[in-house]
Structures are given as structure tokens and as C-alpha cells.
Amino acid sequence: MNNEMAYLLGMVCGNGEIQRGKVDTTIAISIPHKVIKTDDFHDIKLYVKASLENIRKNIEPLISTGIETSQSDTVTRLSFTKPKDDYLIRELGRYIGNATSYENVILHEDVFSFTKDERIMLLRGIADVTGYVRRSNQYLKSYEHRVYIEIMYNWDLAIKICNLLKSVDIPVQVLNFAHPNFRDSHLERYNKGSKDFWKKEHQIKIWVNEFMPIGFGILHKQQALVNFTNEFISQYDGKKPLAQYTHRYYWQSREIEKTRPTHPEVDSSFIPQEIRGKQFSSWKQMAKELGYGENS
């Protein structure tokens, strides 16, 4: 393993598709653009296009082939093709459980044995294709900025990302699960006939200042991360030092349980077997049961 391979692995885990043919395998990676402009009105497509030069410089020597790219207003796509028995293809397959897409990746436990730098690069690769840092991600106060890592459908990957963050001493502020107890907690959408409304992405939320050691390889995301971190630091007016406010894991804070009505969709097959049929009053309970906790 090396930093470049760890970064590529992160991109594949976060938003990759693996197309296996009889002879060749194609790896395709998507970098979504949720909006056309950044918060300060710069064109996101241009920023991503500029970022691709650095990605090419780091990844192409590793894969020993060229990367093809294409762009639309909503997404940038990168892809490359290699023989199916190529060592790099086989290693990627091993680390993702021979998945066909980000939705069914089972990230191998060996990633926790990577060096700290390699784990950081793995997380950066994931964040570059699934992470967002926008003014709208603020918490209670306008300067309390956060990074969102959004994982579609993949429960195992969401928990492993949280544990990888913990392994480099970065706390998760909130893990907003795609679960009916949290995404439709009062059954408002369910009672209007939208029974699947809660089937969204898992949102891993991290304070911007805590995320700085990982950062982004995508230029506009990194620029926003730095600017929002500076704003957070300069405007913070809490009674305790900022590091004490943000550098806390959920098991170090007081538990606040909320009473929620019983939701019929907790029996959905979309939910992992180990928590299916259970009602939860807090994301912390669910995270602990799924394996993200103090002793995991």
C-alpha cells in the first residue's frame, strides 16, 4: 500500500463503479456537483477540472495507464481500463470485497493496519467524491461550519468511515442515518404516502476545524474548508476553548434521548439485520450497536 493507492481506493469506495468483462475491468469514478457555483459564486466545473491535473499526476503513474474524463453540469467522471488479472485491479477488488459499486463495497479490515498517512489519504479520496463543505452545513450558529460525508445506502461503509476517522483522532459530530427514526421521525411523510422518504444517504458530519488534517484534493472544497475553518476560529464565542468544544466523541457528551413514535418502516429489509425491527431514540444508540463506539 502507498498514499496514491489509498487515495484511489477511497475514491472507488466513495463513488466508484466496477465493470468486469471477460478480459478487462473498467473502474469509473464520479465526482458529483450538487450546485453549479460555490458559495462565493465560482464555477465548480472549472475548479474540478483544474483539480483533475493533480489527480492525474498522482494516479496515472500508479495505474500505468491514462485516465479518461468527462464533465456535465452535475458530475465529473473519471475512468480507466486494465486487464482483469492486473495486480492493481485484483488488489482493489480485495479491499472492496469484489464489489460492483460503492453501494455494495465491504471495506476490508486491513485498511485499519495502513499507516496513518495512508488512512488519511483513504479518507481524502472518499471525501473528494462524497464530501461537501457549504455554508448551509452550519450547526446552531452561523459560523459553526461542518463537512458532510454522504454515503448512499452502504451502512457498513458509513460505520467504517467513522472508525477510520477515530483511528486518526477525528470525532464525528453527528451521524445522521438513513433510518425512519431519524429521517421521518414523526411519520409526517409516511402518513402522506411517502413510505420510502427516509431511504436517503447516511450523513457523517464533522466540524471543519477537525477535518483539516484530512482536507480535500478538490480545489474548491479545500478552499471552502480553509475559509470556513478560519471563520469558525475567529468568530467562536463559547465559554470553553474551541478544541474542547469540537474535539469530543459522542461517548464523551451527555446523552439526550428523544421520544419518537413507533415507525412501521423499521422492519424494512433496507435496514441491516442486526438492527432491523428496533426503534432508536438517538443516532448514538444505533452507532454503538453497529460498531462505532468508544471500544470499537
Image (spheres, rainbow, N blue to C red):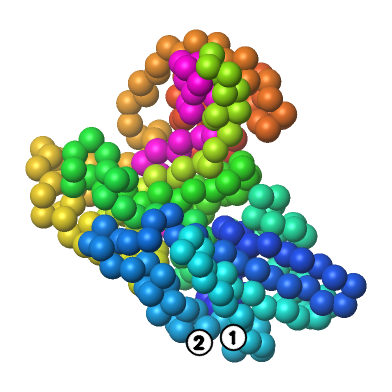
Left or right of residue 264: residue 172:
left
Residue 170 falls inside the magenta stretch = yes
- 130 w.r.t. 200: above or below: below
Where residue 94 sits, quadrant-wise, is bottom right
Question: Where residue 241 sits: x, y (%)?
Answer: 15, 46
Residue 175 - label: none
Kindly give the residue lying farthest to the front in the view shown.
73
Q: Tell me what residue is drawn at x 38 percent, y 61 percent.
A: 36
> Quick one: quadrant of the C terminus?
top right
Question: At label 2, which amino acid type do we have?
Answer: Lys
Query: Residue placed at 58% from the left, 34% from the top?
Result: 199
Q: Is residue 93 magenta?
A: no
Q: Are marks 2 and 1 in contact (CB under 8 Å)?
A: yes
Up/down of 260 relative to 221, above or below: above
- Left or right: 246 in relation to 12: left
* Residue 276 in the image, given as x and y percentages of width and height: 67, 24
Pointer 2 residue: 57
* 183 left or right of 21 in image: left
How far across and down, in percent of the image, does residue 41 sit?
A: 25, 63
Q: Is residue 39 above or below residue 293?
A: below
Highlighted magenta segment, given as a residue range:
167-189
Which residue corresponds to the image point at 85% horizontal and 70% vertical from the top-left? Answer: 21
Identity of the residue drawn at 16% across and 55% down? 231
Residue 163 vs residue 266: left or right? left
C-alpha span from label 2 to label 1: 6 Å
Disc 1 target residue: 60
